[in-house]
Amino acid sequence: MTIGMLKSKLHQACVTHADVYYEGSLGIDVELMEAVGLYHYEKVLVSNMNNGARFETYLIAEPFGSRRIVPNGAAARLTAVGDRIIIMSFAQVEESIVRDGKHKPRVLRLDERNEPIQRIPQAPTTEEIESMLGS
């Protein structure tokens, strides 16, 4: 059996541009995509922290180092320049890997200029939890 798990996340990305007339998608600086293992045309779930909107779309690469986050098409209507969004992708992971604490999503928190400020700590492994509880 497999379980749907978070694979990659850009946390608090700031929308830099929006283009309603582009044919859809979400443009992201390819350097940020590579940092968390996101891929061109990968399906993502986006959550807008400013207005609560959630939508699915796919990714396209913006120039390396540009720090551009660009909702396009219909997604541009669910965001505004300056909004902070969470960009998430998911993967099916074997239950045994999840159970053993071996699955670790790649997560990066960004500042208002989309500069990485923190890798979000990974969840503790089963062994770490047991040692914390004195088991």
Image (cartoon, helix red, strand yellow):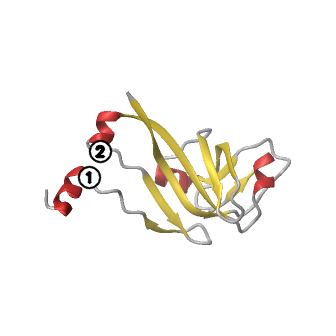
| Residues at marks 1 and 2, CA–CA distance in whole angstroms | 7 Å
In the displayed structure image, the side of residue 53 where residue 89 appears, left or right: left
Outermost left residue:
135
Report the front residue among 125 and 19. Answer: 125
Which secondary structure lies at badge 1? Answer: loop
The numbered dot on residue 125 is 1
Quarter of the image where one finds residue 31: bottom right
- Could you tell me residue 64's position as x and y percent? 59, 56
Vertical relation: 26 (above or below) 94: below
In the displayed structure image, the side of residue 61 where residue 132 appears, left or right: left
In the displayed structure image, the side of residue 89 where residue 17 appears, left or right: right
Report the front residue among 91 and 134. Answer: 134
Residue at 73% across, 53% down: 71
Residues marked 1 and 2 touching at CB (< 8 Å):
yes
- The residue mark sitting in front, 1 or 2, is 1
User: Which mark sits nearer the N-terminus, 1 or 2?
Assistant: 2
Q: Which residue is mark 2?
A: 102
Which amino acid type corresponds to the residue marked 2 in the rendered image? Lys
